[in-house]
Amino acid sequence: MAEISQSAETVTGTSLTGTARVKRGMAEMLKGGVIMDVVTPEQAKIAEDAGAVAVMALERVPADIRAQGGVSRMSDPDMIDGIISAVSIPVMAKARIGHFVEAQVLQALGVDYVDESEVLTPADYANHIDKWAFTVPFVCGATNLGEALRRITEGAAMIRSKGEAGTGDVSNATTHMRQIRAQIKRLTSLPDDELYVAAKELQAPYELVREVAKAGKLPVVLFTAGGIATPADAAMMMQLGAEGVFVGSGIFKSGNPEQRAAAIVKATTFYDDPDVLAKVSRGLGEAMVGINVDDIPVPHRLAERGW
Amino acid sequence: MKVGVLALQGDVREHARALASFGAAVSAVRRPAELDAVDALVIPGGESTTMSKLAIEFGMLDPIRKRIAGGMPVYGSCAGMIMLADRVLDGRPDQQSFGGIDVTVRRNAFGRQVDSFEGAVVLTPFDEPFHAVFIRAPWVESVGPDVEALGRVTDGAAAGRIVAVRQGNLLATAFHPELTGDLRVHRYFVEMARAAVDG
């Protein structure tokens, strides 16, 4: 990564802040955990009580963005302050794709991670944010390996596979996790001299492609997001290779958020133990009603935002 | 020697890889029976409130406390240090640690993620400084008489704060040696654990 500018690194005495290691390391500490969408301090407390490793502050959960339409933006700073004061776990917040000033504001507010998110209305249809320029780390969505590597090139310190947010339909998250996993696996099987063309096809830098081919994994943590509504959904994503789970509308659009949130946390830790999964899946009340992704007209599909 | 890594949440794989490089048989520990099968334990970095909650709900709190009381060697990094501390400041009211090290630890003591940093720490067991990575890290606010302070922050606002401690067979660091290629802390722990286990 030496050839990429890392302008946010700051030296104080013998210490460095804002380094790639510190940013990526933060995501390593979230592994095996659940990050929950919240729109109020009260919801953030419920998430923390349930064992969330972090909360994601946003203006409206994706299901409401879908129902209400309109332009969706960064959350109100007062609301973010309120959420930061309400909990002791890390607080993430969403900025619009390409909206580097929203990201500057979120950094100034002291959020622990910025999600440059397709769930909000994009602010730039050509460029994503130059994430190297920030001390705060970024997570970005990806539907395939090329997209993930382009975001990492721009400085993303964590990737989440995209699903179709606000639907409660896990099928897109499944498709994208399988896609990313299959593309990584393919790279590991290629002879060295075919990695140049692989990089061209992925539209990603050769150095990163070679790194993935050697390690058999992304150089940053890979979570999954979008459409996860049940403990079994979360466990399935973990079995498909996700290192952790984002849950959006699935919790606070369900009948019993407290219990469902706690159950998804347990299911994420014991993702490979069907006895635990059966136990935690009982008596959760109504899951979010949900929408089939196929019923959403193509222009309204969020996962297809970002490139 | 069998070393378990507590796998309720956190950077389990990085610790497992570091331990395996010193010839330890490494396994993930999430259940009491898996704890029974190991000679020593590592508590990884992660979110201490989540680990505490899962440890309580899945019946791991008392078994781990009993093993610690029985002399099992344990190493904890960051959240793991919080889990090994007898007293935790700025935690959740219902947060429980395993305890064992007679220290008071302050959670998120260095600040939020934008304050997370890497830098050199002098550790008494080693000749050369250790390049340490601190992520929303705790520090040790006070230590009891039987606790050995192994390292302190060298400069900046937190200069002098204790960030590595040992008490008997228990070792804890506020930073994450598992995120660097420098495996001296893990080697130190494996040697310490071998000495304790082989008696």
Image: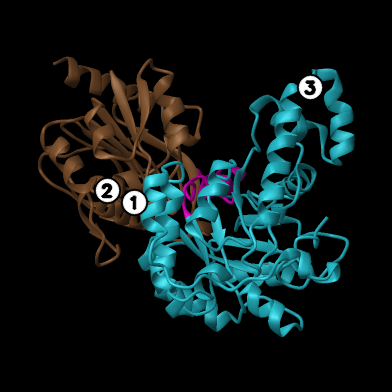
Chain colours: A cyan, B brown
| Closer to the camera in the image, A43 or A274 | A274
Q: Nearer the viewer, residue B145 or A125?
A: A125
Which residue matches tag 3? A190
Crowding near pointer 1: few (<14 within 10 Å), some, many (20+)?
A: many
Position of residue B40 measured from the top left corner of the image (x, y, whole percent): 25, 28
1 and 3 marks on the same chain: no
Instruction: Look at mark 1 in the image and give the residue it sits on.
Output: B51
Instruction: Find residue A163 and report its image quarter.
Output: bottom right
Q: CA distance from mark 1 to mark 3?
A: 39 Å
Query: Which amino acid is tagged 2?
Result: Met
x 68%, y 38%: residue: A181
Q: Earlier in the sequence, mark 1 or mark 2?
A: 1
Residue denoted by label 2: B83
Q: Are marks 1 and 3 in contact (CB under 8 Å)?
A: no
Residue A153 against residue B25 in the figure, above or below? below
Residues shaded magenta: A12-33
Q: Amino acid at mark 1?
A: Met
Crowd class of label 2 (few under 14; some 14 to 19; many from 20; radius 10 Å): many
Look at 46% across and 50% down and name the residue there: A268
Residue at (84% x, 34% y) in the render: A199
Examine the structure image and report whether residue A227 is included in the region drawn in magenta: no
Q: Is residue A111 left or right of residue B121?
A: right
Residue B94, compared with residue A66, is above or below; it is above
Real-space CA distance between mark 1 and mark 2, rounded to the nearest whole angstrom:
8 Å
Secondary structure of the residue carrying tag 3 is: loop
